[in-house]
C-alpha cells in the first residue's frame, strides 16, 4: 500500500495543463483531427518545436507536398 501511495502524483496541474492544451487545439474547425495528428500537435505545443537540421526539414516538407 505504501508503494502505491508513494507513486501517486501530488498535483494534477500537469494533467490539467495538457487538457487545456487539447481544448485549445480541438476547436469546431479542427474537429476531424485524428488521434495521431492531435498527439503530434499537442507534443509540439507542450514541448515546443525541436531544432531540426535542414535535411530533415526538407524531408518533412516534401512529404507533405
Image (cartoon, helix red, strand yellow):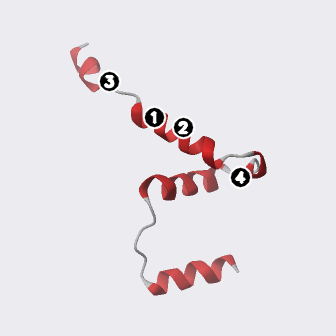
What residue do we see at 69% from left, 51% from top? 34
What residue do we see at 49% from left, 41% from top? 18
How much space separates mark 2 and mark 4, taking CA atoms? 16 Å
Label 1 or label 4, whichever comes before in sequence order:
1
Disc 1 residue crowd, few under 14, some 14–19, many 20+, Cα 10 Å: few
Label 3 or label 2, whichever comes before in sequence order:
3
Identify the image quadrant of the C terminus.
Answer: bottom right
| Whole-percent x, y for residue 6 in the image | 24, 22
Mark 2 in CB contact with mark 1 (< 8 angstroms): yes
How much space separates mark 3 and mark 1, taking CA atoms? 13 Å
Mark 3 residue element: loop
Left or right: 33 with respect to 5? right
Residue with the mark numbered 2:
19
| Picture layout, residue 44 above or below residue 59 | above
Residue with the mark numbered 3:
8
Residue with the mark numbered 4:
33
Amino acid at each position: 500500500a505504501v508503494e502505491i501511495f508513494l507513486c501517486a502524483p501530488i498535483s494534477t496541474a500537469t494533467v490539467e495543463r495538457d487538457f487545456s492544451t487539447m481544448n485549445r487545439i480541438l476547436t469546431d474547425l479542427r474537429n476531424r483531427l485524428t488521434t495521431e495528428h492531435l498527439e503530434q500537435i499537442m507534443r509540439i505545443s507542450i514541448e515546443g518545436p525541436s531544432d531540426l537540421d535542414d535535411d530533415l526539414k526538407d524531408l518533412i516538407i516534401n512529404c507533405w507536398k
